[in-house]
Amino acid sequence: MKRTLYDDDHDAFRESVREFVLRTIEPAEEKMIEQRFVDRDSWLEAGRNGFLGLEVPEEYGGSEAGDYRFNAIFNEELARSSAAVASAFSIQFDIVAPYLVKLSTEEQRKEYLPRFCSGELITAIAMTEPSGGSDLAALKTTAVRDGDDYVINGSKTFITNGTQADLIIVATRTSPEKKARGITLFAVEATDEGFSRGRKLDKVGQPEADTAELFFEDLRVPSSRMIGELDGGFIHMMQLLPQERISGAVQNLAHARRNLDDTIAYSQERKAFGQQIGSLQYNKFLLAELVTKLDVAQAFIDNCVVAHTHGELSAIDAAKAKWWSSQVQNEVLDHCVQLHGGYGYMNEYRVARAWKDARVTKIWAGSNEIMKELIGRDLGL
């Protein structure tokens, strides 16, 4: 079924992104897997192409597209090539960007956004803690007022871009007695005294995306580094999480689609018992089911993208998009590995790496169980 959410301008933008991926990302894939991070040259090249500032006003170096569909295209093309690189870049242009554009002060925007758009300033967002997981309201990292400063103590884990980030938006507890209503966001710079990085985490998949533990020990930041309102952090995060979730959903389906297409081609070439394995009835029916599931899921996600473009995507629909797309993605990729047989278990095959890369999508941005809890509450249950 022809997708109808994109027009000629979007198609032209997709060609630019695809050229960037083919020229910059795919040739460096093995290097990035080995070193376990996206190299700075790739960040700078993305900045030169104007891909990191899609939501940033022109006065700060961005393109201010004013149309989330451009974000979606960048996510799709990155994820088709590498789920990990899509994760790393989307943290910047799709997840951190709204915090810096919508919640920051004029001084903060002038300080950070030009380098953010150029790729000189790599960013991360630090919500998850070792003991908290998806429960953002239970975070323990504190920020205590001391004169005109705040002193931050605590730790974060599973932070994408954590080993390279120059600027980290950190969720802290400023008013413990207020519980969820006592969380505040701060911009922490990597050069701040009291900031340190732990080990680069050794993940099952997505090695190209660096992931780290972060530590804050008596780290002093001026109150001018506060992002958004005092004690307003939880509300800010809840308002901006739908974009993170639709971003992930877009990536999930594009990632699955690329590998399913490859598997269909493989099923037409590979022979067993004297015929193409794709012509065996079970495999033929299975591939028909997988294509249908992806098409149906794509229709819902496309509608969510359009709704978000118009500012109408609800948190509940974003939760549905997040959990269902990751469920379909993982189901599709598991069958793709099976159809490849022994070769599907070899890291030299893209499908094997994709299978490992996909597993985390049912966990991050709020686990699928949390998504179902949110949907269930909305049903009055």
Image (cartoon, helix red, strand yellow):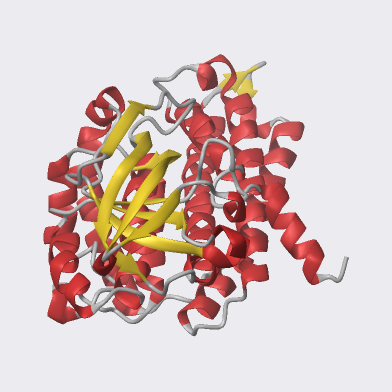
Location of residue 54 with respect to 152 vertically, above or below: below
Picture layout, residue 100 above or below residue 294: below
Q: Residue furthest right?
A: 381
Residue 203, percent across and down? 45, 27
Q: Residue at x 41, y 73 (%)?
A: 69
Quadrant hosting residue 319? bottom right
Residue at 47 percent of width and 17 percent of height: 346
Looking at the rendering, in which quadrant would you find the C terminus?
bottom right
User: Residue 93 is drawn in which quadrant?
Assistant: bottom left
In the image, 244: left or right of 167? right
Residue 82 appears anywhere in the view: no
Query: x, y (%) of residue 157?
Result: 45, 37
Q: Is residue 69 visible?
A: yes
Q: Residue at x 56, y 44 (%)?
A: 361
Q: Nearer the viewer, residue 182 or 79?
A: 182
Residue at the spot x=45%, y=55% of the render?
A: 172
- Between 15 and 225, the one lying in front of the other is 225
Q: Measured along the vertical axis of the image, is residue 64 above or below residue 75?
A: below
Q: Position of residue 348 (x, y in %)?
A: 39, 20
Whole-percent x and y of residue 371? 69, 56
**Front position in the image: 161 or 281:** 161
Left or right placement of residue 223 versus residue 289 in this view: left
